[in-house]
Amino acid sequence: MKKTVLIILAVIVCAGVIAGAVLLFGTSNFTGEDYTIPELDLSVMPEELAGSEYEYLYSLSVVDNSKDYMAHPDSILLKDGNILTVYPAGHGKGAVLNKLSTDGGISWSEAVENTPESWVNSQETPTVYRLEFSDGSADKLILISANPKWPYSDTVGGFECSISEDEGKTWSEFRRFYDLESENPVVPIVAMSSLTRLKENGEFTDKWMGLFHDADFYNYKTILTFDEDGNMQWSVPEKYFAEHREIEQSSNMCEVEVIRSDMGQGDELCLITRSNSKKINSLISFSQDEGKTWSEPVEAPAALNGERHKAEYTSDGRLFITFRSIERGSKAAEYANKTDKVKGWMSEGLVAWVGTYDDLKQGTEGDYRIKLAHIYFDDQTEPEYYAGSDTGYCGNVVLEDDTIVTCGYGKFSPDEKAEDGTLRTYICSKRINLSDTDELVERYLKK
């Protein structure tokens, strides 16, 4: 592979979004804009950085490549500093597997052999969260997996929950909520795409708002609580975006991430969506009443347009948000003329956005983007601008020294072959400290 500098400065081109015309978007009618902030490409290391303090930024650590297709990881930082990553043995549907890193994401253990029997029948990408309690009692970890409608599946409807009270050493068997036999059935997809601890009278309480969507792109919320005996309870799922149904439906809004203001301590919530129709950008909406109502959504800047956003704050107050890149501007149009693989949009693959909560609030583009790794097409032998879009769904944690460890999936190598000769899809992690990426952006992209 050539050791060339593949640090990309985004082309400044404004295609313009015409109000009222966005829903007419077609394969030859590109209505999106190109992002204008710099993008740092970490897929190939420049020769001059070999052996330097920045070399680690270009390295990937394999989490799991034991099958031809591994995907959809989520991660959580344990109290002892270790990182637990969970993922399905397949595309969404498949037994929940897990790996542990005891060295900050540099290497990963063999699968931890403590999984409940019910995890084998998981039907969807698992998500994992930490639950803290106002009375100072021990934290719980919760793992959630939805039951969407898969072909030939006997398990349809509701979502499964598993609890750990000992930092992931042991887990409870799945407990199902709101399946087709219940009084209030739902058929969720990606549950819970976000789980947000709620406030009452300005103080955190022991309630958490979980969000998911269904196949008709209705978006639901349900509130998690625990009774006096410690049993988990979920409120009846309700459609929280009904006031904006026309926008929700036309964008095929799904896989929502919720970000709390003021480094996760503030009184405002920001919602950022995947627009699965690809006709408009990701949507952003805000709530000042703990998710009871939401502002009319607006399109996110092109720099944030994508799918399955996952956000974490660093100690300087900035946000690091990973997602699957979706580009709808002039670059997408240019590549559509070169390949038949693009239907009105293209992807740069696995990317991250660096900016502030105020950028989200003001609709500004942020500081810069990072191409975390190249996701190969089967006919690519080295990284290019145009990348595969079967990626994202990252698990992100921030270590004590502000190092970010992000775990994502994709076709990371042109040399990893599946049994059918196509490229293998697997899970890798990368370590990033924004002080180092800041330096490279300043050195290469702001001259």
Image: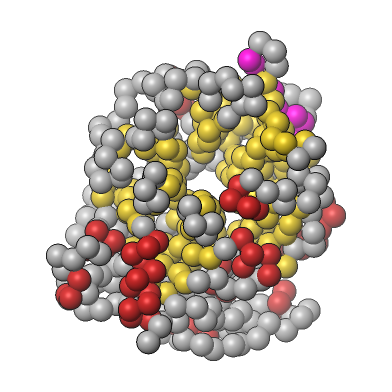
Q: Position of residue 231 (x, y in %)?
A: 64, 16
Judge whether 164 appears above or below 82 on screen.
above
Q: What is the residue that sits farthest to the left in this orientation?
A: 51
Quick one: quadrant of the N terminus? bottom left
Classify 153 as above or below 344: above
Residue extending furthest toward the right: 243
Relative to 247, does residue 217 appear above or below in the rendering? above
Q: Position of residue 361 (x, y in %)?
A: 68, 65
Q: Is residue 108 visible?
A: yes
Residue in the image at 75% along x and 63% along y = 297
Residue 320 is situated, as x and y percent measured from the top left of the image, at 49, 58
Which residue is painted at 25% across and 32% down in the image? Answer: 110
Principal SS element in the magenta part?
loop
Within the magenta stretch, is there residue 235? yes
Q: Is residue 120 left or right of residue 344?
A: left
Which residue: 45% across, 69% down? Answer: 369
Magenta residues span: 230-237
Q: Quadrant of residue 202?
A: top right
Q: Describe residue 60's horizontal placement relative to residue 23 as left or right.
A: left
Kindly indicate the quadrant of the structure image that contains residue 154: top right
**In the foreground, 75 or 104:** 104
| Residue 87 in sight here | no
